[in-house]
Amino acid sequence: MSWLAKLLFGGAMEMFTTPLLSAWKAKLEADSDEKRLAAEQAIKGIEAARDIAVAEAADRWSATRVGRWLIVVPFGIWWASIYLVQIVNPWFGLHLIVIDVPPDIHSMALVLVPAIVIGDAGALIARRLGR
């Protein structure tokens, strides 16, 4: 859980800013043209990755956007229904149950949901750095 909090509250920002700042620092401290060119190439590579993330975020049919609708939303509704049933059952004396997600889908969701969240966080940071 701490890795998710770190990611959402600064870890994703570090993922983009740290390499870019390091490359700029290396360029400024370069004592030869070769080192300066290498730093410039690193900067261009990082900026290109940022531009790709921005384009990915803007694309209606990107993997992140489609995955959000096909994986994150249904899994979120399933989790919300578990909590809702836990609240409603004691209040109204009901015996509602939520059918468990098949193990294969549950295993996939445990990998894909964080990947999509990280992708969204990365695209958000890339858009902010791009301005």
Image: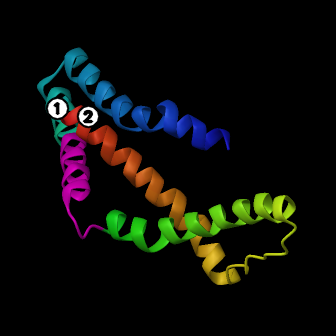
Q: Residue at x 73, y 79 (%)?
A: 100
Q: Residue at x 57, y 35 (%)?
A: 6
Residue 77: image location, x then y, percent: 57, 67
| Residue denoted by label 1 | 131
User: What amino acid is labelled 1 in the image?
Assistant: Arg
Residue nearest the viewer, comparing 52 with 116? 116
Task: Determine the main secondary structure of the stretch shown in magenta.
Answer: helix
Magenta region: which residues? 45-62
Rendered location of residue 84, percent (x, y): 70, 61
Please check the rendered image and state whether residue 61 is part of the magenta-colored stretch, yes or no: yes
Q: Is residue 16 magenta?
A: no
52 sits left or right of 12 in the view: left
Q: Is residue 128 left or right of residue 89?
A: left
Label 2: element kind: helix
Q: How many marks?
A: 2
Q: Which mark is residue 112?
A: none
Foreground residue, 92 or 120?
92
Whether residue 25 is situated above or below residue 48 in the rendered picture:
above
Residue type, numbered disc 2 = Arg
Q: Is residue 87 left or right of residue 27?
A: right
Question: Residue placed at 20% from the left, 40% from the top?
Answer: 47
Instruction: Quickly name the residue at label 2.
Output: 128
